[in-house]
Image (spheres, rainbow, N blue to C red):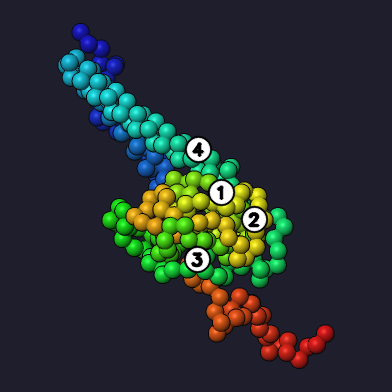
Amino acid sequence: MFSRKKFITVCEYCRKGKIFFPPRMFLKELVFSCIFITSLIVVPSTIFAKETLPSDTQENISTASTTEGLLASTEQMIEQLIRQIDLQQDNTLDKGELADNPNPTSYFSSIPNIRPTGGKITSIYGIRVHPVYHVPLFHSGIDFSVPEGTRVQSTGDGIVAFSGYDKGYGQKITVNHGYGFKTIYAHLSKSLVRQGQKIKRGDIIALSGNTGVSTGPHMHYEVHKNNVIVNPTAYFFDENNPDKFITIQKTSPEQEGNNS
């Protein structure tokens, strides 16, 4: 015999439901009450349905969930390791390079405004089809076609921040000119300066070569301004406009008559 006290008829359930639905209930409270009542019905039925599944089906679901979890965890670990390796490589290069030029010369002497070497510019700054990988990639500088052993000069006063081998750049020199300017000379055959050495515009700092990722003898040249890669040709000296690096502050009409 089952006791009827354990069960509630629909009418009784509705009458008890009036506790949750007073006449002047706000909409927010009404929605909350509906969710609460629904959970009392749905959750037990879900648990009951899970318990009635065959044991082999439950084991398969558990195994699938465990496998998916392991795969997700493994992918996350691999991604984390890749990030750590990339970060270590970047930090290694940064630690080996002087961060700043504490005592630069004058602003005009430090601007990298001359060509680093002779020869024809064979690859310009911007998007191009990479000569080795044969896919469109951003070219961060310009390339000068010169025979191996051609002299390379500093384009402005500064201090040698890096001199050595750097992956795709091959033999490379980085010069920190101060005032936010930095220049890079790559694919060299020989460096003629050392890290920390002070140099002047026009000093011979290296010989061109064919090191690193390169298809032939040439010299790669970059200009960075405030840690942003810019077009080097924008800083080449222009005889028709020698004052292009001078910033002229225009006076407003209201200030023109004020001499104080």
- The residue at which mark 4 appears reads as 88
Which residue type does callout 3 highlight? Thr
Seen in the image, is 63 located left or right of residue 127?
left
Q: Residue at x 50, y 66 (%)?
A: 117
Q: Nearer the viewer, mark 2 or mark 4?
A: 2
Which residue type does callout 4 highlight? Gln
User: Can you see residue 192?
Assistant: yes
CA separation in Å, label 4 and label 1: 20 Å
Q: Residue at x 76, y 91 (%)?
A: 257
Q: Secondary structure at mark 1?
A: strand
Outermost residue toward the right in this view: 260
Please provide percent x and percent y for residue 76: 38, 33
- The residue at which mark 3 appears reads as 117
C-beta proximity under 8 Å, tags 2 and 1: no
Looking at the image, is mark 3 or mark 4 earlier in the sequence? 4
Q: Quadrant of residue 199?
A: bottom right
Q: Is residue 163 above or below residue 46?
A: below
Q: Nearer the viewer, mark 3 or mark 4?
A: 3
- The residue at which mark 2 appears reads as 159
Outermost residue toward the top in this view: 1
Which residue type does callout 2 highlight? Ile
Looking at the image, is mark 2 or mark 4 earlier in the sequence? 4
Q: Nearer the viewer, mark 3 or mark 2?
A: 3
- The residue at which mark 1 appears reads as 163
Please provide percent x and percent y for residue 40: 32, 28
Q: Nearer the viewer, residue 54 or 226?
A: 226
Q: Nearer the viewer, residue 55 or 14?
A: 55
Please provide percent x and percent y for residue 211: 42, 50
C-beta proximity under 8 Å, tags 2 and 4: no
